[in-house]
Image: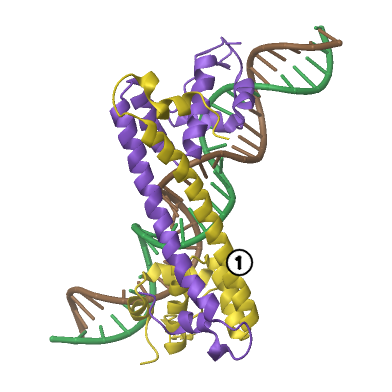
Chain colours: A purple, B yellow, C brown, D green
Amino acid sequence: MSNFSIGKLAESAGVAIDTVRYYERNGLLQPAGRLASGYRRYGGTELKRLRFIRRAKALGFSLEDIRTLLALSAERNVAKVKRAAQLKLADIDARIAELERVRGGLRKLIAACPGHGRAEACPILNALNDEELH
Amino acid sequence: MSNFSIGKLAESAGVAIDTVRYYERNGLLQPAGRLASGYRRYGGTELKRLRFIRRAKALGFSLEDIRTLLALSAERNVAKVKRAAQLKLADIDARIAELERVRGGLRKLIAACPGHGRAEACPILNALNDEELH
DNA sequence: CTAGACTCTGGACCCGGGTCCAGAATCAAG
DNA sequence: CTTGATTCTGGACCCGGGTCCAGAGTCTAG
């Protein structure tokens, strides 16, 4: 099961071959070795790592974050891993709060808009044209 | 008050000069006219329009959206403006829902992580290494 | 009139996360 | 051995929303 090509690795992890090479360029995933021809070879370790990267991305971590996460994982530093996760959580909280703020503004305008009639009576256009949005 | 330079316009709206020219390149804001030297001249209409653009951006609209919004505003089509706002609201709802999904996953992992001890006991590392995240 | 501030243009560059390409080399199946 | 699939490299390009630059021309206050 170990020792396979970049194509097989990419397929197993559900990513594009170019993405694997992109991760390599960015220091996230090195091949286990190379053939005499220069072809990359991967083993189970690299497949696990690639899947780790994908899952971390699904949890909102950037590739930069993931580089850190992989280093923490390698040094088995549970405390730092937890802190990194908490920071990411705070980051996501902030993004949600900002979107909720925006949503609130938009909802109010939509609720107040009759959807017909004079443009001057449309609170959406009025808000965009005249009012301060804090 | 009308008839001012790009610098004054940018300052009044709180954006960079390059941003004004960028909006012009992208069809969002034309100058009212030009001096013989080629210098752009703007009036109150353009300042309002630039502020409109900024406010719409603050409500989550893309520049592409805003081009549409400006056209709808010009044709005073309240119904279409309302529909555009509703679409944007749905878009923001979806983004919030996705972030909340991610946040839920992250929260569970953090809550279950003791923050110390063996790496094997860290649910965050385990999740990244082993589990399917749906 | 002069100095310093402003503006013009076209184009390059930034961010993150990839994607796509050409031309050459290599691998694997039949 | 041949053929078709795969891989190699380096570099260009994509998205959105700007930002920065050089070199030349223009405007304005003193």
Instruction: Residue at 59% x, 27% y: name it.
Output: A13
Q: Secondary structure at mark 1?
A: helix
Asked if residue B59 shows in the view, the reply is: no
In the rendered structure, the answer to whether residue B78 lies left or right of residue C30 reads: left
Instruction: Residue at 35% x, 92% y: name it.
Output: B1
In the rendered structure, the answer to whether residue B5 lies left or right of residue A106 reads: left
Out of A82 and B80, give the one closest to the viewer.
A82
Out of A10 and B37, give the one closest to the viewer.
A10
Identify the residue under disc 1: B87
Instruction: Residue at 60% x, 66% y: name it.
Output: B87
Quadrant in which the C terminus of chain B is drawn: top right
B125 to A60, vertically: above or below:
above
Marker count (numbered): 1
Q: Position of residue B75 (x, y in %)?
A: 63, 85
Out of B22 and B110, give the one closest to the viewer.
B110
Q: Amino acid at mark 1?
A: Leu
Q: Position of residue D6 (x, y in %)?
A: 68, 22
